[in-house]
Image: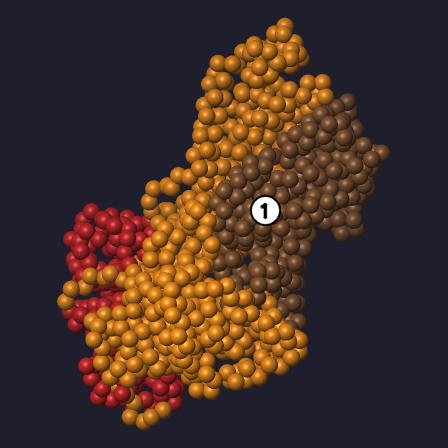
């Protein structure tokens, strides 16, 4: 999970070709937005195709598993017709897409309810958990990484540097569900101050442990990224320029280091945060948290494929949205990204 | 003639062959993995009976015979954890091998493919990476079904996009390098291009990715087993064991300990290895500065000297710049710069010319210290503790412009007015007016437009003129120009030189002009110091330099090295 | 005039498509007669490196022809194209990126002779003499690029280009990353090789004085157009175009007439 940044080359060789001077103003924003939207559409389209393909790819007859173990041949045939499994593939795909466009994600036979209903019921739990974890991560990791990066710049305070390095490596290496187990052991079993699992009566309180389990490893990962990027940014030419203008440490840090730091940090954080969404799958299981993660696990276990399709699709779109959000933030922070000069 | 080349061009800090530099994290991680690996392998060979055989010692607490106690079937929990760990370890290794091989092949092949295929493939990889790996693994596990090898395959396939993207990015970067271009032009076949040029230069980052893949693979597989989609009872791995232990966490918390501990050992081991490899590959980390922290930049007196009043704006006596280990890089340099004088300092790389300038502006890089018996700019004694304001009044700098001297995130206006707002207490509006005037002075055609621009929208010449305007905004006593025209085209450079000459003629600002180019120095400077290896070897007047009246062989060699136009156009330009 | 040598006729190269397209080269014609060195001068954005890339087929030309010894190279088949690329060699600009850091000098040189297998054995004599040609000791063959300075690397890059005895050498800004004294040495080396090997060379540089030192003829490029072409003597003493005059006037520290070095 070590995020590797592209190698910085010190030497800049001016490309010997007329530099396209970009028109200033609105057009760069429009084309930026269009490019990002295009990326989002690509991600969604692939997700739709892949989720559709899940069912035909699964070994065994989905109608058999849907109808249940005691079903008669007639019942199975009826279920098959109900699921449309007797029709040609293309027709079924068009139906699937058509349904999606109308917000119809299919019918969950294990819960005997529309998938969209199940998803809507579970979505707030996962979204809330991810959002809380995200807030905690960004609020802690960014200042922590910057502080350590600034304190250890140019090889200073090597002890702090290695203490930080080892501690974060250690904590980041703890898988979220192990972290969850450890937190349950400490807060629920030993100290008995927080509920060990989701309790309907105290949703807020029972959210604390899952959010912590999700965010602590990510905090360490992102703090490491921020620390390294801080070290890189502090060596840039424009920081030397700002120091030459004697603007003072705080002003230099806030106006010259921070914005440039955010560019690379956000890029890498986006990847880590999407990974966090994956972590929700296992953490929700530990705490019995009724979100989409637990939902997809149960659906796979009960072979409820329409439900698997629906939840996977929603989670994929959710992570695509998260990536796009990060990209848009990047565009706001760094004009070069908008101009498309940043690769 | 003899042609031994002794130039001190520093070797580029890019990947160079050589032995792996072992460091603390790498040793600790490798040790952890190897020891754990050996222990679980031995355990799986010798303790299989106590791990899987049923015994009457049901649900025992920890004891000498059963260190972690037994489960409801009388199986030893420690033995189960160790044997389960061996399964997890082998599965993680298998998954890593699959995903690394496939990912690296795909990533490198993308870059040797024709452009259209390449762009399409890159987009596909980009899309697949944007789904959470664990979610992809869950979907694959659903398709492939439960069981050990299905699990390995699911996790390996889910990890391929990340590895492929890294490999593609790395090969993309290496592809830009000239040796790949020449190799392709020579007709090196594709497999040799990958084997000889791409893969060897990607080794370090790929090793780091290998460690990361192992760690994510281990975690993902345990996670799938944990949520019940992976290894199924009676088969077991660490995730399965942890899941089995969790329901009984209140009654037998000890049952959680074994699997938890082993997952931690393995994944921390992998993390440390990855970290150690990254540190060993990163030139920034290995280039260590002082072990004992020193004050970063201090200028302290070497010996006292009577301070008689002198007309010079800048006085430098016995300036020594040292590395943290005491090695001197500049050996006792002394010079003056008068009011309105341009002093040139010439030398090749490593001569100490830039360090001399940076000492005067108190901007030496970390780990370097300067000392002198006298170091003054106008009224400011740099050996004391000048305030920021005093420093800003005393000295301003102009740098070489490779396009990175301005903050890419801010508009020019906000950066250029900074000095005026901070040190002169001007309102943003006043500062803008002043800077607009200064920009007009340095012949910027449309200052308001420049102020609205971001740095990347400007040409090198415009940025350099803006840099001069910003430097002049503080009305400094000394202007230091460090290779200001080196990155510019001749016609643009000539314009910048004219601006510097104009500043000398119109103000009484002293200028320290640093360059490797004797031609430029000869044209602009009133006086020239020639530096070599941290020492001033010769001081020349402009006239002496022009007529070639030099005594030092080094200066002569430099002069003769400068390519000159021998022919002069008949018509004056 | 014979057709021997390299000729570029009316070459146009455009980057990008549609409204965003920029013209890098616009109907450029350059002739490098056999045994001559033609200096190609221009500022950044003039298209001088693009021309080198277009000759070698690294960037596609929109129209125009590249001729080697009178033969159009655009219609060549795979096999003939490979032969063409062995007859025309490129020396790149950056000494730090022109050599693979993971391969010894011998391996790098052997690859030029034997692209498919890059076997050093069987080529040791050729390698030794190629190194000797650029005044490097024979034991340099066993070492890695990082053990050499920038100037030495550039010599190795030259040796790599010359080892196949190409008919035409394209040198793209090969001295611009070097210190002046090292640059002088590399230029002296080139001058010697030009004499000894009778090189046909397209020498690309932004530095007029450097170009003047090594070239028989000079072509001045600006914004993708040839502004001026002629013998070195003519272009430098009696420039016809205003742009060339401005370029020459901008060169700093032009020695006053007749001023001796002592």
Residue A133 position by quadrant: top right
Is B155 located above or below residue C185 in the figure?
above
**Disc 1 marks which residue?**
A223
**Dot 1: element:** helix
Relative side of B559 to A212, left or right:
left
Which chain is rendered orange in the image?
B
Label 1 resides on the chain identified as A
State the residue at coordinates (22%, 86%): C259
In the rendered image, residue B401, in percent from the top left (x then y), is placed at 45, 70
Quarter of the image where the N terminus of chain A is located: top right
Furthest residue toward bottom: B571
State the residue at coordinates (30%, 90%): B569
Is C230 located above or below residue A99 in the figure?
below
In the rendered image, residue B273, in percent from the top left (x then y), is placed at 47, 37
Q: Is residue B520 visible?
A: no
In the rendered image, residue B527, in percent from the top left (x then y), is placed at 33, 79
State the residue at coordinates (46%, 40%): B276
State the residue at coordinates (42%, 44%): B280
Which chain is rendered red in the image?
C
Residue B157 position by quadrant: top right
Which chain is rendered brown in the image?
A
Relative side of A270 to C185, left or right:
right
Task: State the colouring used for the structure image.
Answer: by chain
Is B179 located above or below residue B239 in the figure?
below
Furthest residue toward right: A201
């Amino acid at each position: 999970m070590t995020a590797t940044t592209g190698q910085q080359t010190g030497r800049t060789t001016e490309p010997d070709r007329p530099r396209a001077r970009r028109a200033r103003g609105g057009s760069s924003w429009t084309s930026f937005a269009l490019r990002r939207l295009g990326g989002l559409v690509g991600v969604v389209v692939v997700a739709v195709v892949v989720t559709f393909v899940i069912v035909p790819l699964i070994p065994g007859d989905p109608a058999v598993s849907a109808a249940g173990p005691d079903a008669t041949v007639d019942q199975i045939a009826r279920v098959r017709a109900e699921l449309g499994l007797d029709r040609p593939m293309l027709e079924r795909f068009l139906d699937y897409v058509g349904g999606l466009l109308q917000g119809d994600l299919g019918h969950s036979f294990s819960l005997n309810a529309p998938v969209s209903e199940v998803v809507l019921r579970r979505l707030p739990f996962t979204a809330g958990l991810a959002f809380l974890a995200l807030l905690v991560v960004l609020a802690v990791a960014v200042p922590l990484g910057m502080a350590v990066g600034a304190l250890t710049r140019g090889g200073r305070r090597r002890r702090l540097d290695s203490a930080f390095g080892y501690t974060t490596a250690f904590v980041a290496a703890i898988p979220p569900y192990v972290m969850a187990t450890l937190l349950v052991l400490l807060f629920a079993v030993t100290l008995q101050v927080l509920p060990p699992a989701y309790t309907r009566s105290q949703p807020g309180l029972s959210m604390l442990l899952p959010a912590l389990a999700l965010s602590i490893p990510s905090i360490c990962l992102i703090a490491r990224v921020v620390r390294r990027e801080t070290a890189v940014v502090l060596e840039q030419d424009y920081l030397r320029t700002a120091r030459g203008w004697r603007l003072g440490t705080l002003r230099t840090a806030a106006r010259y280091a921070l914005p440039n730091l955010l560019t690379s940090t956000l890029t890498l954080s986006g990847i880590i945060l999407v990974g966090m969404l994956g972590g929700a799958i296992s953490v929700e299981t530990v705490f019995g948290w009724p979100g989409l993660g637990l939902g997809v696990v149960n659906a796979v276990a009960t072979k409820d494929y329409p439900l698997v399709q629906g939840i996977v699709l929603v989670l994929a779109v959710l992570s695509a949205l998260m990536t796009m959000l990060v990209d848009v933030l990047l565009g706001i922070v760094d004009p070069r990204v908008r101009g498309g000069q940043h690769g | 003639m003899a042609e031994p080349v002794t130039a001190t061009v520093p070797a580029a800090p890019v990947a160079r062959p050589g032995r792996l530099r072992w460091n603390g994290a790498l040793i600790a991680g490798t040790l952890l993995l190897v020891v754990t690996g050996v222990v679980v392998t031995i355990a799986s060979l010798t303790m299989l009976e106590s791990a899987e055989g049923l015994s009457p010692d049901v649900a025992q607490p920890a004891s000498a015979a059963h260190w972690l106690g037994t489960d409801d079937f009388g199986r030893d929990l420690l033995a189960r954890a160790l044997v389960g760990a061996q399964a997890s370890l082998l599965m993680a290794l298998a998954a890593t091998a699959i995903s690394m091989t496939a990912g690296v092949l795909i990533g490198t092949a993308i870059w040797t493919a024709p452009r259209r295929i390449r762009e399409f493939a890159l987009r596909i990889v980009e899309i697949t990476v944007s789904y959470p790996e664990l979610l992809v693994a869950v979907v694959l596990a659903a398709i492939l079904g439960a069981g050990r090898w299905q699990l390995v395959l699911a996790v390996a396939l889910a990890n391929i996009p990340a590895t492929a993207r890294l490999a593609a990015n790395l090969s993309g970067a290496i592809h830009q390098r000239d040796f790949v271009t020449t190799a392709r032009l020579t007709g090196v076949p594709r497999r040799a291009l990958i084997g000889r040029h791409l893969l060897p230069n990607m080794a370090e980052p790929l090793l780091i990715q290998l460690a990361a893949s192992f760690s994510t693979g281990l975690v993902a597989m345990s996670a799938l087993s944990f949520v019940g989609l992976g290894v199924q009872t009676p088969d077991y791995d660490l995730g399965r064991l942890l899941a089995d232990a969790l329901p009984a966490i209140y009654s037998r918390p000890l049952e959680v300990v074994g699997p938890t501990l082993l997952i931690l050992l393995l994944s921390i081991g992998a993390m440390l290895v990855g970290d150690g490899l990254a540190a060993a590959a990163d030139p920034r980390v290995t280039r260590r500065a002082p072990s004992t922290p020193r004050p970063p930049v201090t200028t302290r007196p070497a010996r006292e000297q009577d301070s008689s009043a002198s007309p010079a704006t800048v006085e430098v006596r016995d300036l020594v710049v040292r590395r943290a280990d005491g090695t001197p890089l500049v050996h006792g340099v002394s010079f003056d710069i008068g009011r309105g004088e341009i002093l040139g300092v010439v030398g090749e790389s490593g001569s100490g010319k830039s360090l001399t300038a940076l000492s005067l502006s108190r901007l030496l890089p970390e780990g370097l210290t300067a000392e002198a018996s006298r170091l003054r700019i106008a009224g400011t004694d740099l050996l004391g503790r000048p305030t920021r304001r005093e420093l800003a009044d005393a000295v301003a700098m102009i740098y070489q412009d490779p396009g990175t001297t301005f903050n890419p995130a801010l508009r020019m206006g906000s950066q250029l007015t900074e000095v005026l707002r901070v040190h002169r207490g001007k309102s943003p509006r006043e500062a803008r007016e002043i800077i607009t005037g200064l920009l007009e002075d340095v012949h910027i055609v449309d200052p308001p437009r420049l102020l609205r621009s971001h740095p990347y929208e400007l040409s090198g010449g415009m940025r350099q003129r803006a840099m001069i305007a910003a430097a002049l905004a503080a009305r400094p006593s000394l202007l230091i120009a460090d290779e200001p025209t080196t990155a510019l085209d001749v016609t643009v450079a000539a314009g910048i030189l004219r601006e510097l000459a104009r500043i000398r003629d119109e103000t009484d600002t002293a200028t320290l002009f640093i360059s490797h180019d004797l031609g430029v120095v000869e044209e602009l400077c009133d006086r020239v110091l020639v530096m070599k290896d941290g020492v001033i070897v010769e001081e020349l007047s402009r006239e002496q330099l022009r007529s070639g009246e030099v005594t030092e062989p080094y200066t002569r060699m430099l002069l003769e090295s400068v390519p000159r136009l021998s022919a002069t156009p008949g018509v004056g330009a | 005039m014979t057709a021997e040598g390299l000729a570029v006729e009316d070459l146009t190269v455009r980057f990008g498509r549609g409204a965003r397209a920029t013209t890098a080269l616009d109907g450029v014609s350059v002739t490098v007669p056999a045994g001559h060195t033609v200096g190609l001068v221009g500022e950044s954005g003039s298209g001088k490196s693009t021309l080198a890339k277009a000759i070698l087929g690294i960037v596609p030309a929109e129209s125009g022809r590249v001729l080697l010894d009178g033969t159009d190279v655009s219609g060549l088949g795979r096999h003939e194209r490979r032969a063409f690329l062995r007859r025309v060699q490129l020396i790149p600009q950056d000494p730090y990126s022109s050599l693979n850091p993971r391969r010894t000098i011998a391996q790098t040189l052997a690859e030029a002779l034997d692209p498919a297998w890059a076997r050093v054995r069987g080529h040791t004599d050729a390698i030794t003499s190629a190194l000797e040609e650029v005044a490097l000791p024979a034991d340099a063959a066993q070492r890695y690029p990082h053990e050499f300075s920038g100037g030495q690397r550039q010599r190795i890059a030259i040796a790599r280009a010359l080892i196949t005895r190409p008919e035409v050498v394209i040198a793209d800004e090969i001295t611009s990353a070097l210190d002046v004294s090292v640059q002088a040495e590399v230029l002296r080396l080139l001058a010697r090789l030009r004499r000894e090997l009778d090189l046909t060379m397209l020498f690309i540089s932004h530095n007029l004085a450097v170009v003047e030192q090594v070239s028989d003829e000079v072509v001045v490029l600006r914004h993708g157009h040839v502004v001026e072409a002629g013998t070195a003597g003519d272009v430098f003493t009696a420039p016809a175009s205003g742009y060339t005059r401005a370029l020459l006037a901008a060169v700093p520290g032009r020695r006053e007439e007749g001023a001796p070095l002592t």
